Amino acid sequence: MVYRDLLTSTKSDPFKKLTMGFKRDKGRSSGKITTRHNGGGSKRLYRKIDFKYDKKDIPAKIESVEYDPNRSAFVALVSYADGEKRYILAPQGVTLGNKFIVSDKAELKTGNRLPLKKILSGTHVHNIEIQPGSGAKLIRSAGNFAELLSHEGGYAHLKMPSREIRKIPSGCWATIGEASNIEHNLEVIGKAGRSRWLGKRPTVRGTAMNPVDHPYGGGEGRQPRGTKRPKTKWGKTTGGVRTRKPKKYSNKMIIKRRVKKKRK
């Protein structure tokens, strides 16, 4: 069963007790645009997602798999054996009625959550903690996963979706499998109006502007870029320039930097 069919068979309305209203970022401060291309969009309810997974050793059952407008992956409404209900990120492949558990004694099955030290090398994981007990921070978007390469010196070595290899403390917890909605990257927006529903305002090319508005602006007819290297509207160099702080606290956790994609 594919997720598109699955969604039509579950309830369309979210579980009301786990939702809340929130003020969306419109890209403005005191009425002035501070972030370009943001604004508008359809009204959304926020689903309270359990990223802490603090109900350990209590089995849970998938009650429904639902679309969440605030994230790319699907969410699942789960019911724990003690009667409590929560939203979690749905792993790829789970269906209605599937069971999972958060436990350091759980089996290596899609949806189960364990400490990294209890997971075998070569396993795909998502919803990964950075520090033990901090809650899931890494690999939460649609179709993503990290591959557990090895264990060494109290750390697990993980290969991220960017092909960066980094160390994570072995006491951190992770969910077995991949995040759901792996076909998200194949989605076709189709028209400008749908982008507006998503809260995205129009983007104007720099070369179509006047010289006063952009480094690429001006000229008769179509002109080449005319600058030595690509720049933003404010003249800041972009396009392949490393922006990571050289003294960032997590630099020591990176074993191999991500591979920069070659331009065609």
Image: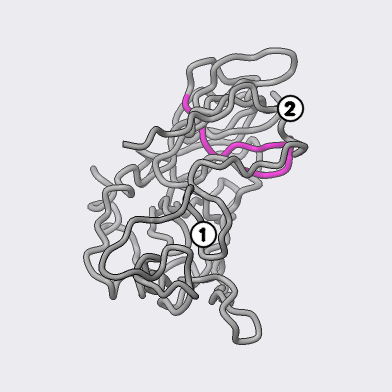
Q: At 43% from the left edge and 35% from the top edge, which residue is drawn?
A: 178
Instruction: Say which residue label 1 marks.
Output: 232
Disc 2 from disc 1: Cα separation: 30 Å
Mark 1 Cα-neighbour bin, 10 Å: few <14, some 14–19, many ≥20: few
Q: How is the image coloured?
A: one colour
Query: Which-is-in-front pick, marks 2 and 1?
Result: 1
| Residue 128 painted magenta | yes
Toward the viewer: 18 or 223? 223
Question: Considering the numbered disc 2 on the image, is that residue within a helix, a strand or a loop?
Answer: helix
User: Is 190 rendered above or below residue 179?
Assistant: below
Label 2–label 1 contact, CB within 8 A: no
Instruction: Say which residue label 2 marks.
Output: 252
Quarter of the image that includes the N terminus: top left
Name the side, left or right, on which 126 lies relative to 224. right
The x, y position of residue 67, in whole percent, is: 38, 59
Give the magenta part as a residue range. Answer: 124-136
Toward the viewer: 77 or 122? 122
User: Is 74 rendered above or below residue 193?
Assistant: above
**Amino acid under disc 2:** Lys
Residue 183, picture quadrant: top left
Q: How many marks?
A: 2
In this view, the residue farthest toward the front is 220
The x, y position of residue 237, in whole percent, is: 56, 51
Mark 2 Cα-neighbour bin, 10 Å: few <14, some 14–19, many ≥20: few
The x, y position of residue 123, in whole percent, is: 48, 21
Name the side, left or right, on which 50 lies relative to 77. right
Name the side, left or right, on which 228 lies relative to 83. left
Name the side, left or right, on which 189 lies relative to 101. left
Q: At 61% from the left edge and 39% from the top edge, which residue is drawn?
A: 58
